[in-house]
Amino acid sequence: MTREAIVARLSAQRVLPVLRLAGAQETLDAVGCLHESGFRAFEITMTTPDAVALVGALVRERPDSLIGAGTIVDVANAEACLSQGAAFLVTPYPVRGVAARCRAARCAAMIGAFTPGEVATALEEGADVVKVFPASTGGPSHIAALKSIFPGICLCPTGGIDHEQIPAYLQAGAAMVGAGSRLVDRDALARGDRNAVVANARRYLQYGA
């Protein structure tokens, strides 16, 4: 799959689950619920225990889905996840060399930024998507301001976004949004209430292209 095709699939889903859970099994359970709800792309953050191996396991277990790795802070991290078959990598801020590694591996690069200067740096590095983090700090108006400077850019605001705020971000010019703590009902997941986890997640998919 080309980088362009990966970005197109991510954009079509509109909401990218950003999974930052306490353990591997909890993450696998969450992915199972989100997959049942209709999601077919997932970001596993490197703050998750055994995250690299978890990315590989999900790549093998979910061949119909795009599995990406987030919170990539150095090239070594990037290469480890690419070796496991990650379809896209996500950084929290511009990290030199990550986008180049992604291009070589035909993997999409989602590079983090917040200010116009950081966005410019991310683009110079070769970002396919710019992750605007933390989204809640600037809100939809910040996304609209960035789009006015970089009209052709693919933006993915992430951080503190709930399902009711998604339309405002999309209308402001975001191609997609990242959603984490509010997307997965952790209390329901902990008590094994799969139906509640699935129902909560489905509220985020109504904005799909």
Image (tube, grey):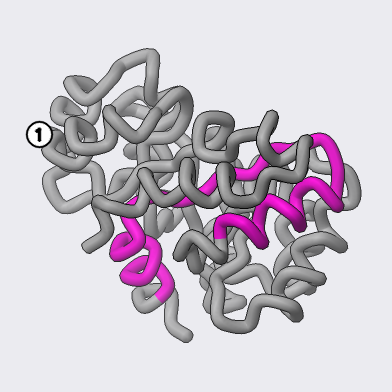
Which quarter of the figure is the C terminus placed in?
Answer: bottom left
The stretch in magenta equals 6-34
Horizontal and vertical percent position of residue 166: 27, 36
Residue appearing at x 77%, y 36% in the figure = 190
User: Residue at position x 55%, y 65% from top?
Assistant: 36
Residue 49 picture quarter: top right
- Whether residue 206 is in magenta: the answer is no
The residue under label 1 is 148
In terms of depth relative to the viewer, which is nearer, 199 or 144? 199
Q: Position of residue 63 (x, y in %)?
A: 63, 83
Residue beneath the point at 12% across and 45% down: 151
Q: Is residue 150 above or below residue 146?
A: below
Answer whether residue 18 is magenta in the image: yes
Tag 1 secondary structure: helix
Main SS class of the magenta portion in the image:
helix
Looking at the rendered structure, the kind of residue marked 1 is Ser
- Above or below, 139 relative to 189: above
Query: What is the quadrant of residue 104 in the picture?
Result: bottom right
Q: Residue at x 82, y 58 (%)?
A: 52
- Say left or right for 145 vs 15: left
Left or right: 123 in relation to 73? left
Residue 165 locus on image (x, y percent): 27, 28
Q: Residues within 10 Å of mark 1 (few under 14, many from 20)?
A: few
Q: Quadrant of residue 53?
A: bottom right
In-image side of 181 versus 38 (left or right): right
Residue lying furthest top: 137
For the residue pair 183 and 159, the one nearer the viewer reads as 183
**How far across and down, in percent of the image, does residue 39 sit?**
48, 62
Along the viewing direction, whichever of 116 and 33 lies nearer the viewer: 33
Total numbered labels: 1
